[in-house]
Amino acid sequence: MPRTITIAGNWKMNKTATEAVELAKPIIQSIANQSEITVIMCPPFTALHAVSELIANSSTRLGAQNMSDKASGAYTGEISPAMLRDLHVTHVILGHSERRSYYGETDAIVNKKTLAALENSLKPILCVGETLAEREAGKTFAVIKTQLVQGLAEVSASQAENVIIAYEPVWAIGTGKTATPAMAQEVHAFIRQELTGLFGESTAQKIRILYGGSMKPDNADALLSEVDIDGGLIGGASLTAKDFLALVEAGKTAAAKKV
Ligand code: PGA
């Protein structure tokens, strides 16, 4: 069974709820109930409810961009897994490099969130990736290994099938610099090898590994043709319906080739 190609839009801190509906509407109308690939929209928390209502009868999935690892209580400003589930959220981005660098999220915190997501039947999209300094120092694989091993600590093999990994080289996020398909494939293959060590071959073959970092319609086909690139986590180019739909088309083309 080939892994289902996944196209996920990370809208970051963009779009009011009103604007999110304007963006999501034409996308949902256009892709309707396609089932060739998994499409996930990750609006900000404040737009989850509005987008949830729009996608209720479609195959499009809803993702959050962060989550508390706590179930409830005195955690001002935080959002619990149950709150997301209640809005029909199915996926949650965890450990994005912006959260790691601006909000001090460590691998230990990312691990707690990953476990909480899985316990609440939310699929984590666990982000890993090296900075430019780390790449130039030859530390790419070591950094990614640590992020994987620590971020996935205590995750069982059966739970791991519900985890999506996103490889996002920090130097490529929002910069217009994309990893070449060969550079990305090299790291994706390394990630799959590490997942094999952690969870065994058959589980590792099922886990989807997305690429993120300046992915856009004109580089998506080449990236998605690589054997271990199972989709994209897309920031900037997910903010217009035209580009998002073009990326969905690229995903479908790749899915048709990978059968
Ligand atoms: P970008 O962001 O596509 O704008 O580079 C990707 C991401 O950070 O998820």
Image (tube, rainbow, N blue to C red):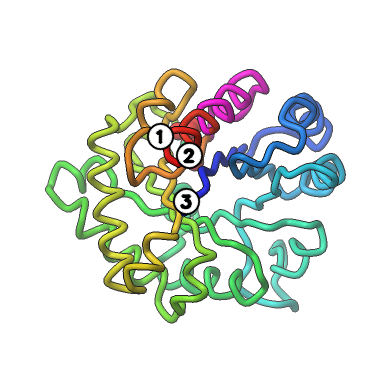
Mark 3 and mark 2: Cα distance apart in space: 13 Å
Give the magenta part as a residue range. 235-251
Identity of the residue drawn at 50% across and 76% down? 158
Q: Which SS class for mark 2?
A: strand
- Is residue 27 toward the left or the right of residue 204 in the image? right
- Classify mark 2 as within 8 Å of ligand 1 or not, answering yes or no: no
Question: Could you tell me the amino acid type at mark 3?
Answer: Arg
Q: Position of residue 252 (x, y in %)?
A: 55, 32
- Disc assigned to residue 119: none
**Magenta run includes residue 196:** no
Question: Could you tell me the amino acid type at mark 2?
Answer: Gly
Question: Could you tell me the amino acid type at mark 1?
Answer: Leu
Q: Bin the neighbour count of mark 1 within 10 Å (Cα to Cα): few under 14, some 14-19, many 20 and up.
A: many
* Image: 14 above or below 94: above
Between disc 1 and disc 2, the foreground one is 1
- Is residue 118 toward the left or the right of residue 165 in the image? right
The mark that comes first in sequence, 1 or 2, is 1
Between disc 1 and disc 3, the foreground one is 3
Instruction: Please identify the quarter of the rendering in which residue 212 is found.
Output: top left
Identity of the residue drawn at 61% across and 51% down? 65
The mark that comes first in sequence, 1 or 3, is 3
Residue named by callout 1 = 224
Q: Which SS class for mark 1?
A: helix
The mark that comes first in sequence, 3 or 2, is 3
Of the pair 45 and 114, the residue shown nearer to us = 114
Between disc 3 and disc 2, the foreground one is 3
Residue named by callout 2 = 232
Residue named by callout 3 = 3
